[in-house]
Image (cartoon, rainbow, N blue to C red):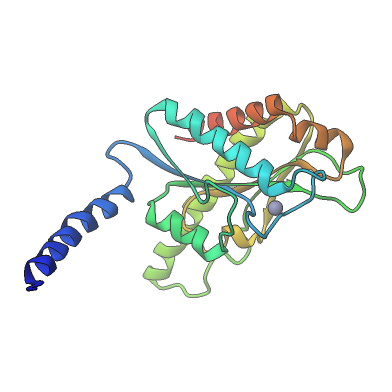
């Protein structure tokens, strides 16, 4: 059998399919690209919530609710770093952000404390510490300006989340935290980590697993994304 036609057909197929899959990774024209990151997954369980649930389940539930909500708004293109219970490495998560040309990144987590008294939500943004480079060449200055712009935008985004989450958990904010968070390092877009509450606190835990509260949290975060744009 002469398989040359077959080979030609396969090459043609690749030529057609490759641009298509590539196009899928581009945000559609006129839409803002957002990456939502359900913390943990697969063998990485995160904090234990109950015998039935771990942090990875809660973060996926809230992230999926957020996608559903944002898909309705029309002008936002949402990607999750995982849509099922699977392991996703830190580098894979960052690769997705880059590939999707995301304009903003939000990572969802559940906190744990040494004592059961710790309660409330926390929002982390990339640290300003060490943000400025020592060199003073024009290239470095431009780089610093770009870096400061997304750091400032991260703070602005974090403040919006604080305002909207405060409606779900009144007076439960533990404030904005400027910190070295591995999930946020090396990104050049506004990015935050939201710790929605403490699995180690009985009152927080009850709220976190409650479907209505999960919906309220998802709505508050989506509102923050819309406010940001
Ligand atoms: Zn976590």
Most foreground residue, 123 or 91? 91
Q: Is residue 217 left or right of residue 112?
A: left
- Quarter of the image with the C terminus is top left
Q: Position of residue 189 (x, y in %)?
A: 47, 52
Please name the residue shown 63% across and 56% down the image. Answer: 42
- Number of marks in the rendered image: 0
Q: Position of residue 53 (x, y in %)?
A: 75, 44
Please name the residue shown 86% across and 33% down the image. Answer: 203
The relative height of residue 229 versus residue 26 in the rendered view (above or below) is: above
Residue 43 can be seen, yes or no? yes
Q: Position of residue 98 (x, y in %)?
A: 41, 57
The relative height of residue 135 versus residue 222 in the rendered view (above or below) is: below
Please name the residue shown 26% across and 50% down the image. Answer: 23
Please name the residue shown 87% across and 41% down the image. Answer: 201
Residue 145 can be seen, yes or no? no
Residue furthest to the front in view is: 1
Most foreground residue, 166 or 41? 41
Q: Position of residue 159 (x, y in %)?
A: 62, 38
Q: Is residue 203 left or right of residue 110?
A: right
């Amino acid at each position: 059998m002469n398989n040359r036609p077959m080979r030609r057909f396969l090459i043609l197929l690749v030529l057609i399919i490759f641009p298509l899959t590539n196009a899928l990774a581009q945000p559609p024209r006129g839409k803002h690209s957002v990456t939502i990151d359900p913390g943990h997954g697969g063998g990485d369980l995160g904090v234990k919530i109950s015998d039935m649930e771990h942090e990875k389940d809660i973060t996926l539930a809230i992230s999926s609710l957020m996608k559903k909500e944002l898909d309705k708004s029309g002008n936002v293109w949402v990607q999750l770093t995982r849509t099922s219970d699977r392991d996703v490495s830190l580098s894979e998560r960052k690769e997705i952000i880059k590939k999707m040309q995301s304009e903003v990144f939000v990572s969802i987590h559940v906190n744990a404390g040494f004592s059961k008294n710790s309660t409330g939500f926390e929002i982390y943004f990339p640290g300003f510490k060490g943000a400025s480079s020592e060199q003073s060449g024009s290239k470095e200055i431009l780089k610093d300006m770009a870096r400061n712009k997304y750091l400032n935008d991260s703070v602005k985004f974090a403040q919006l989340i604080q305002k909207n989450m405060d409606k779900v958990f009144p007076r439960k904010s533990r404030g904005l935290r400027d910190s070295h968070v591995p999930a946020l390092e090396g990104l050049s877009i506004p990015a935050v980590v939201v710790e929605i509450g403490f699995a180690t606190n009985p009152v927080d835990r009850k709220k976190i697993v409650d479907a209505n509260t999960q919906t309220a949290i998802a709505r508050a975060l989506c509102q923050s994304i819309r406010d940001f744009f």
